[in-house]
Image: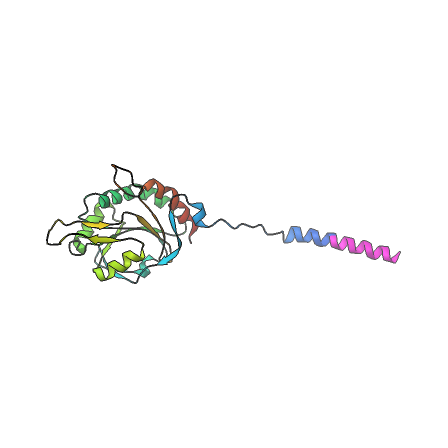
Amino acid sequence: MQQKWVALIAVLSLALGVYLALTIAPPSIDTDEPPLSAQTQYLNWYPQARALSEFELSKHDGTKMTNKDLQGQWTLAFVGYTFCPDICPVTLAELNNIYPQLQKGVSNTPLKVWFLSVDPDRDTVERLNEYVNYFNPDFVATTGPHTQLFPLVRSMGMMYAISESTDNPNYLVDHSASVVVINPQGNIVGRFKPEHTPGEMSISDVDHILADMPILLSSGS
């Protein structure tokens, strides 16, 4: 009889333990989300985030900009120059058009748009200030010496080249047309690449940016 009572108490104790485990400390549910690269549709992610080369550039407002200014925010960066006849003004105008909608998607980290001029001989601080404010006063424009620009642009996975003599005041600058994405740690994670369609200007599709960026802005990472 005593053995039966011991067995009954053991069963009741086990049942009580299961009940308490379920009610007081229920099993944890795996809430791991897929990586951001799997959640976006159009952003061309690099295999791993790329650190930018160290830089100190002149901003359009006369202050300095360094790598530290990219931390704590998501950044859309675009390489160009103010004398660009087509790609640069169209891209900046398109980014300005979607900027209010992008700002609505900001939850954990801010968003900045950065225009990096690779034509320091003509793009003075004063000209950059006038140029960027024409599109949006919230945008940031910078430039600096080629000794900093070349490694910086390369570290972005981009390029630029002055293919003719600068003695011609209307010289053109060849440059990448992608919009690159910089994470809150100040590293490049990928880019929105233009789709090359015959007869059309090769610029990044802002609808693609508008589709993917809210996912990043809500992540905070």
Residue 71: quadrant of the picture: bottom left
Q: Main secondary structure of the magenta part?
A: helix
Q: Residue at x 32, y 50 (%)?
A: 180
The residue closer to the viewer here, 119 or 93, is 119
For this view, does 20 lie left or right of residue 115? Answer: right
Residue 6: quadrant of the picture: bottom right
Magenta stretch encompasses residue 192: no
Q: Residue at x 40, y 49 (%)?
A: 216
Which percent across, then down, holds residue 163? 18, 52
Say how the picture is coloured: rainbow
Which percent across, then down, holds residue 130? 18, 49
Q: Quadrant of the N terminus?
A: bottom right
Q: Residue furthest right?
A: 1
For this view, does 3 lie left or right of residue 144? Answer: right
Q: Quadrant of the C terminus?
A: bottom left
Relative to residue 189, is residue 95 depicted above or below? above
Magenta stretch encompasses residue 9: yes
Q: Residue at x 28, y 56 (%)?
A: 153
Q: What range of the chain is rendered magenta? A: 1-14
The residue closer to the viewer here, 124 or 20, is 124
Relative to residue 96, is residue 74 depicted above or below? below
Which percent across, then down, holds residue 118? 22, 54
Which percent across, then down, holds residue 154? 29, 57
